[in-house]
Amino acid sequence: DGGITQSPKYLFRKEGQNVTLSCEQNLNHDAMYWYRQDPGQGLRLIYYSQIVNDFQKGDIAEGYSVSREKKESFPLTVTSAQKNPTAFYLCASSASGAGMRMGYQPQHFGDGTRLSIL
Amino acid sequence: AQKITQTQPGMFVQEKEAVTLDCTYDTSDPSYGLFWYKQPSSGEMIFLIYQGSYDQQNATEGRYSLNFQKARKSANLVISASQLGDSAMYFCAMRGNTGNQFYFGTGTSLTVIP
């Protein structure tokens, strides 16, 4: 079945450590996204990528890094510079392009990764 | 600038009753798409319904319908015959026709009472 796979489901980070969250999609989508969600809050955009080897910062990119070497994969690294990383992280993808003729395709989401500090 | 506003942090509805979740938006794009997502306590985001700004009719998907009023820039979600499993957070989102960014509201927490 087509979809988005995030791993791991739960992740623990030690002080000063970088950790990487995996996101893989087999929907053949060009665009991929990372969001952070704090308890009881909405989604905040960390990074997004519209095409391989290109990505843009979102609203809260500081302390995070991404790569997009393959269309299917968009891993997120939470660096030691991110002092408050405890949150729920959601990866999403969507078909690229939008407009009156093409319609507007929704985002499809993975099941998320819960990151905590040890 | 694109903006989505959901003014109801929490809502309660009796089982089997209908409920309306409010969403207003602001955009300068000539055309755009509006979406509603459901997020149960387990965390996954489930796509519910979509409305294109140029669509003449309101979207419907089973028990979900979208009350789209373009002039008022509102896209309210109506859930008919509420079920206990409808208890969740609901997010309204918008996608414009420039770039691939989506804009989300802050969400409404819906609780269905037996």
Image (spheres, coloured by chain):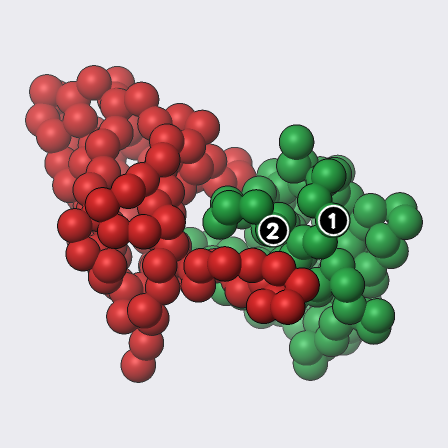
The chain holding disc 1 is B
Which chain did the renderer colour red?
A: A
Give me the chain letter of mark 2.
B
Is residue B21 visible to us here?
Answer: no
Quadrant of the image occupied by residue B87: bottom right
In depth, the one of B82 and B51 nearer the eye is B51
- Residue B53 place in picture, x, y as percent: 75, 59
The residue indicated by pointer 1 is: B30
Q: From the viewer's side, name the closer residue of A96 and B106.
A: A96
Q: Whole-percent x and y of residue A101?
A: 64, 68
Look at chain B in the picture and name its colour.
green
Residue drawn at point x = 45 percent, y = 28 percent: A59
The answer for how far apart the CA atoms under marks 2 and 1 are is: 8 Å
Evaluate whether residue B70 shows in this view: yes
Q: Residue furthest front?
A: A101
In the rendered structure, the answer to whether residue A24 lies left or right of residue B91 reads left
Which quadrant of the rendered structure holds the C terminus of chain B? bottom right
Q: Position of residue B104 (x, y in %)?
A: 58, 43
Q: Residue at x 42, y 32 (%)?
A: A58
Front position in the image: B68 or A80: B68
Residue A64 vertical position relative to residue B12 in the rendered view, above or below: above
The residue labelled by disc 2 is B97
Q: Residue at coordinates 68% horizontally, 77% vertically from top-left?
A: B61
Instruction: Say if mark 2 contacts mark 1, CB within 8 Å.
Output: yes
